[in-house]
Amino acid sequence: MIHAHRYGTGPRAVLALHGWAGTGAIFEGLARHLEGRATVWAPDLPGYGASAPPSTWDLQVIADQIVDAW
């Protein structure tokens, strides 16, 4: 299961993906600059932060998990 951070309540949606050594929490500062203009969704990619590792380390499996969390 993918854990996603949600920042803000703006009318536009932004999907922010962290690098392989981080978590979605790194986008909190950026989201403050978009307050009122965008809602930022920043998932912890599989195996990082509060997200469980994927069943298989396969790009399609990981992409599907992110889409399902969105």
Image: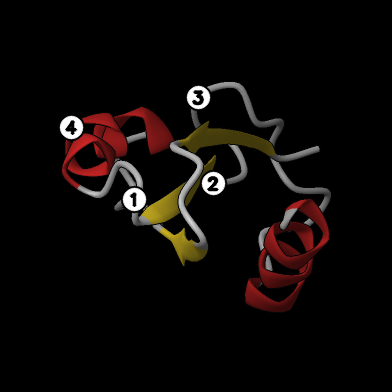
Secondary structure at badge 2 equals loop
Give the Cα separation between the discs numbered 1 and 2: 7 Å
Residue under label 1, please give it. 18
Secondary structure at badge 3 equals loop
What x and y, as percent, mark residue 68?
83, 60
Q: Are marks 1 and 2 in contact (CB under 8 Å)?
A: yes
* Vertical arrangement, residue 54 with respect to residue 56, above or below: above
Nearest to N terminus: mark 1 or mark 2: 1
Q: Are marks 3 and 1 in contact (CB under 8 Å)?
A: no
Secondary structure at badge 1 equals loop
Give the Cα separation between the discs numbered 1 and 4: 13 Å
Label annotation for residue 55:
none
Residue under label 2, please give it. 45
Q: Residue at x 29, y 53 (%)?
A: 19
What x and y, as percent, mark residue 13?
51, 63
Closer to the eye: label 2 or 4:
4
Which residue is nearer to you in this view: 17 or 6?
A: 6
Q: With 59 as the anchor, is 65 left or right in this view?
A: right
Q: Amino acid at mark 2?
A: Leu
Give the Cα separation between the discs numbered 2 and 4: 19 Å
Q: Are marks 2 and 3 in contact (CB under 8 Å)?
A: yes
Give the Cα separation between the discs numbered 4 and 3: 17 Å
What x and y, as percent, mark residue 61?
77, 67
Q: With 70 as the anchor, is 44 left or right in this view?
A: left
Nearest to N terminus: mark 3 or mark 1: 1
Label annotation for residue 49:
3
**Quadrant of image for the N terminus:** top right
